[in-house]
């Protein structure tokens, strides 16, 4: 009974933007980042790829955080591609903060861009009855 078993640390986090929901799993590995089972390097367009890499880039600025020794697995659904990218980057940043338990990293994220840790809860305003959209109404004519 004297054998020690190595406990594998796994972190799960969620990020949201509009109707997009991203769930991230961070665990020990070889530095692989996958979004919906696709490697980060082949994600198109490049704007989305850059947005998704931001939390990892900021974390790599810290000498005690090794982003090459963790695997990041993200599943995103709902919304458009930019909404999904912003939800995923929020989830990744939250996961990294929980994984490292580093308050300096949390402060750096908040200083860099608050939306990395705080989900943007703005939603589309619903269409009203008798109208073309949320605010646009039919024009009133007296003649």
Image (cartoon, rainbow, N blue to C red):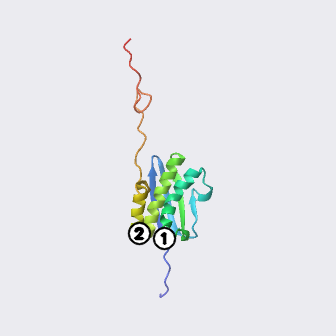
Which residue is the site of mark 1? 65
Q: Secondary structure at mark 1?
A: loop
Q: Secondary structure at mark 2?
A: loop
Q: At x 48% / y 68%, what residue is drawn?
A: 10
- Could you tell whether 37 is left or right of 22 in the image? right
Distance from Cα at disc 2 to Cα at disc 1: 9 Å
Q: At x 43% / y 31%, what residue is drawn?
A: 133
Q: Badge 2: few (under 14), some or many (20 or more) residues near its Cα, within 10 Å?
A: few
Task: Let me know if residue 75 appears in the view.
Answer: no
Q: Which mark is residue 102?
A: 2
Q: Is residue 51 above or below residue 67?
A: above
> In which quadrant of the rendered image does the C terminus lie?
top left
Q: Badge 1: few (under 14), some or many (20 or more) residues near its Cα, within 10 Å?
A: some
Looking at the image, tell me whether mark 2 or mark 1 is earlier in sequence order: 1
Q: Nearer the viewer, residue 65 or 118?
A: 65
- For the image shown, how many numbered marks are present on the structure? 2
Place of residue 126 in the rendered image (x, y in percent of width and height, measured from the top left):
41, 37
Place of residue 122 in the rendered image (x, y in percent of width and height, measured from the top left):
40, 45
Q: Which mark is residue 10?
A: none
State which quadrant residue 34 falls in: bottom right
Q: Residue furthest top?
A: 143
Q: At x 50% / y 79%, what residue is drawn?
A: 6
Q: Nearer the viewer, residue 51 or 14?
A: 51
Q: Residue furthest right?
A: 42
Q: Is residue 90 above or below residue 135?
A: below
Task: Let me know if residue 54 appears in the view.
Answer: yes
Q: Are marks 2 and 1 in contact (CB under 8 Å)?
A: yes
Q: At x 41% / y 29%, what residue is drawn?
A: 136
Place of residue 58 in the rendered image (x, y in percent of width and height, measured from the top left):
48, 62
């Amino acid at each position: 009974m004297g054998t020690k078993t190595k406990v594998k640390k796994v972190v799960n986090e969620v990020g949201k933007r509009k109707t997009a929901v991203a769930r991230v799993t961070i665990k020990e590995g070889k530095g692989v980042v996958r979004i919906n089972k696709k490697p980060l390097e082949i994600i198109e367009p490049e704007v989305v790829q850059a947005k998704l890499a931001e939390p990892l880039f900021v974390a790599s600025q810290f000498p005690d955080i090794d982003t090459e020794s963790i695997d990041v697995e993200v599943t995103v659904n709902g919304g458009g591609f930019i909404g999904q990218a912003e939800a995923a980057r929020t989830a990744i940043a939250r996961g990294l903060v929980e994984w490292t338990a580093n308050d300096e990293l949390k402060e750096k994220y908040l200083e860099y861009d608050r939306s990395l840790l705080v989900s943007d809860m703005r939603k589309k305003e619903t269409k009203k009855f008798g109208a073309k959209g949320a605010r646009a109404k039919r024009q009133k004519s007296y003649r």
